[in-house]
Image (spheres, coloured by chain):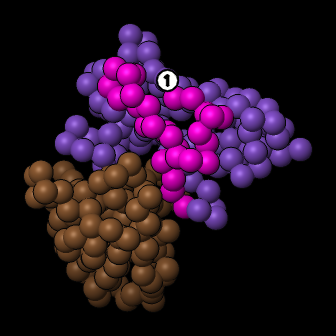
Chain colours: A purple, B brown
Amino acid sequence: EVQLVESGGRLVQPGGSLRLSCAASGFTLSNYWMSWVRQTPGKGLERVAHIKKDGSEKFYVDSVKGRFTISRDNAKNSLYLQMNSLRVEDTALYYCARDADRGGDLDFWGQGTLVTVSS
Amino acid sequence: DIVMTQSPDSLAVSLGERATINCKSSQSVLSSVNNENFLAWYQHKPGQPPKLLIYWASTRESGVPDRFSGSGSGTDFTLTISSLQAADVAVYYCQQYYSTSTFGQGTKVEIK
């Protein structure tokens, strides 16, 4: 059974940093592109970062470029999102999601981890 | 970036009736390479992660009831729930994955 379990979300002050983790099981992580998608009340769903199977290519939405870094450790079956210079508008539920091997649709999602940026 | 616009923002439908959600992209998401539309639909219920319903605009994901169907091509797409069930109350999103990825703003479906 495919499982994605996120962790690391918490309350953090503006300007602070946070590292999210996603533990994958039930499939071979190295065979799939992976994404971080966030849900905010105001903007709905937004894919913030996307990483190739071997980690050699990474893509970011403009609003997080230069602040967030996506990475993966296929040997540890893990995906990460390093979040620096956090802003209030980064407050969201962050999901780890698997890209289907046929394209960029997202066929499995974790339950999400909540990041709250507030003073 | 490709902008995805859904309509309506919300709709209320009686049980057993048809629900129709529209999604329009600011540019075509039809690939000339494989002749597929890079368009997916998701169902999102409170407290749960989004669930993939449809990919390639009209292909149902495994296990998705056949009352859900997707149609359209190029820039205009539709998700239809042929006979609304109580379990279908949710927010529905379209997503293009032709050029990076962007989602529509969501359509909330409720029971009338």
Please say whether residue A20 is visible from this viewpoint.
no
Quarter of the image with the N terminus of chain B in it: bottom left
User: Residue A57: x and y, percent?
Assistant: 39, 28
Residue bearing the label numbered 1:
A71
Neighbours of disc 1 within 10 Å: few (<14), some (14-19), many (20+): many
Image point 45% across, 37% down: which residue?
A59
Q: Give the range drawn in magenta.
A: A44-70
Q: A14 above or below B13?
A: above
The reply to whether the magenta stretch includes residue A53 is yes
Please say whether residue A28 is visible from this viewpoint.
yes
Image point 75% across, 35% down: which residue?
A85
Query: Which chain is indicated by disc 1?
Result: A
Count how many numbered circles sit on residues in the image. 1
Quarter of the image with the C terminus of chain B in it: bottom left
Viewer-proximal residue among A50 and A1:
A50
User: Residue A63: x and y, percent?
Assistant: 61, 48
User: Residue B48: x and y, percent?
Assistant: 48, 52
The reply to whether the magenta stretch includes residue B104 is no
Image point 82% across, 40% down: which residue?
A14
- Element under disc 1: strand
Amino acid carrying label 1: it is: Ser
